[in-house]
Amino acid sequence: MNKVLLRGHEPNEPAVRPLRPSEAPEAPAGVGLPTISLYLAILRRRKWVIAATVAIALIAALIITVLMTPLYTAHALIEVQRESANIVNVEDVQSEAATTAEEFYQTQYALLKARSLAERVARDLRLYQDPAFLSAFDMDDALQGTSRQLTMTEAQRQQRIKAVAGVLLQNIDIEPVKLSQLIDVSFTSPDPKLSAKIVDAWTRNFVEGALERRYEATSYARRFLEQRLAQLKAKIEASERQLVGYAAREGIINVTSAGEDGKSAGRPLVVDQVVGLNNELQEAVADRISAQSRMRAGGSSAASLNNAALTGLRQKRADAAAEYSKLLVQFEPGYPPAQALAAQLRQLDAAIATEERRVESTASNEFRSASAREAALSRKLEDLKSDLLSNRTRSIQYNIFERDVDTNRQLYDALLQRYKEIGVAGGIGVNNISVVDSPDIPSEPSSPNLLLNLLIALIGGTVIAAGIAFALEQVDEAIADPSEIPQTLGLPLLGIVPKAVTGDVQEELRDRKSAISESMLSIQTSLEFSTEHGLPRSLMVTSTRPSEGKSTTSFALAESLARTDQRVILVDGDMRSPSLHRMLDVPNSAGLSNYLAGDDGLEKLIHRGPARAPAWMTAGPPPPNAAELLTGGRLAQLLEALSANFDVVVIDAPPVMGLADAPLLATRVEGAVYVIESHATRLSMARIALARLRSAQVHLIGCVLTKFEAKRAHYGYGYDYGYGYGNRDLAPAES
């Protein structure tokens, strides 16, 4: 048969140009984010698994609730104040301001859960010997039956107390009331009276323990202060004896006086002497200077002017001189009365001169006396200064001893005052913890709560069921939704072939109104837009693994194309496991393998059907190695010859995984259609198979999803695709 070239190709070019790597479609980097509808669809598909899991959880909760022992919970409410009432203005040993409010209350919560408190309650109620308590918590076996012994050693008693305390701590519940200073204390046990008794003992021992801790802290402080006071008292006595002894040896005499701050202070006696003598010296200097001034002034000095005798004499002389001057106006000097006045004046002058000499002598004597007193005081002051310097040198050690005495006395006084305050505060006994509500004997069990357990089982079962459903979805790699194909495989979706309703695919294909026939028309329409010239001249249909519907898709696609008056030939390219001859019920004595092996009788290998039906070529006898036949040049010659006589060549190719046949066939055709079985093909295997085809530079036109069930899809409620439109009987009112 003559070789006919495909339209649009040069003679020396291959029939189909392989795609370059840059032209091969790439799969997207990741999958789109799941939506709420996706989750709902998963839950809908796994509804029976979810329902079974939730039912099992509810049944288990019901059985457990029925079998559980009723438990009774007793409650008590206590108030813990931040600070206790300060009845007297005396600080306690434990300062509440030392910690923050949060630290304080966390400390109280921890004390309420302390093992020491639990052991105290066990001793108080003698629970380690209480048969009701031991049987209620199944502790008889744990204590090896020794609880009924009348006598026991101290070690055994401590062992029992610790075991009982552990049980108490496991069943006690401490819950603070929000935004308050209240704390709820509760205990749960099978016996309501026992629960109330334990809660009452718990709160009572907690209050007593707080009081004891305060008293113990005060008692310890008192004992400590007593020891320190005795030590300080002894130190004060020793330091005072040392101070007095040193002062006696060194001759240090201090005078006590009130200081500026009102406190008594002592200073050496020589200091007062120096101060007094210095004041006297200043007065003596002033007197000497005054006497010297009077002595140097003589008769005109202030002393002579202030002298009464001189003043009287001078007054008499002035009077006599006035009378004498008046007589001389009328008489001569020899006039007897004038002579008498002259003699009187001479006597008065002599008396004045005598008195002035006496005043001058007195001033000189006063100056000499003042000078002598000043010199004596100066000498005495210098001696006292030497004594003061010597006293200060000796007082250094004296002051050290004195400060030691003062320090010890101050410490003693402060500790004595604190000792008195602690004694007052410790005797008051005020506690900042009080019981608000005492426990009542519970009348109804607190557990088991059937409704609560069923609700918990419902929620927990739902969560577990949802987790199982999503885990199954993660394990299940099958493609269940058409929208996953473009996202996960990077190929366009050519069409969706629904699952056969009757189970006979060929019968439904013969019905042109069936959903499968409609889906093939949809695929055919998609193929017409796959190349620049429309429908590919040659295409191959393959899949990841066998039994995915590739042979049925090839046959149905050829049938659909032939109905459009196109010349179509269907070639069974699966020489390893052929299926076309079984579908057509014809012998497979000669076919593709014969031509590839060198048989040039192409016409006898082609079988033609009736009008508007495709021709076909079976696979022929299985060759020893199908891949070797496909690698030769006979495959290209076959495609050229078939393309010359037919409009479309459809090849039913073998699966991709594990075989080299499909990539070899795909490189010779214009395009490849990839078939994926819905809900069966694993996504990872499909990716590997497509990667093999892309590495061979195959032109992948798109994917066909076969055996699809809309109700099993992620968005199954919306995937009807209209294939059944018009096939339902319409009501008379419909148009």
Image (cartoon, rainbow, N blue to C red):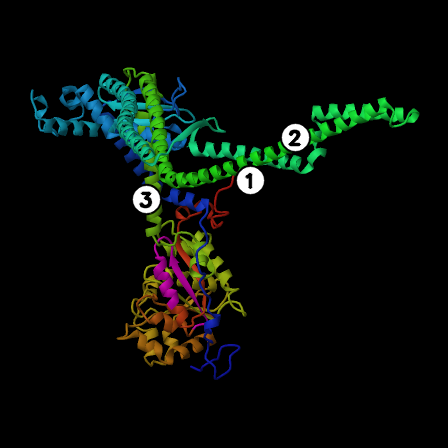
Segment colored magenta: 669-691
Total numbered badges shown on the rendered structure = 3
Which residue is under mark 2?
358
Q: Are marks 2 and 1 in contact (CB under 8 Å)?
A: no
SS under mark 2: helix
Which residue is at 43% across, 38% downward? Answer: 388
Which residue is at 37% across, 76% downward? Answer: 604
Which residue is under mark 3?
468
Q: CA distance from mark 2 to mark 1?
A: 168 Å
Quarter of image, res 649: bottom left
SS under mark 1: loop
Front in this rendered view, residue 144 or 518: 144
Q: Are marks 2 and 3 in contact (CB under 8 Å)?
A: no
Q: Residue 309, how many percent across, how many down?
A: 70, 24
Tell me the amino acid under the disc marked 2: Arg
Front in this rendered view, residue 182 or 35: 182
Where residue 28 is drawn, which disc sits there?
none
Please identify, in this view, whether the residue under mark 2 or under mark 1 is nearer the observer: 2
Where residue 734 is drawn, which disc sits there?
1
Q: CA distance from mark 3 to mark 1?
A: 46 Å
Decide if residue 33 is on the left or right side of residue 300. left
Q: Could one spot residue 281 in this view of the protein?
A: yes
* The stretch drawn in magenta includes residue 690: yes
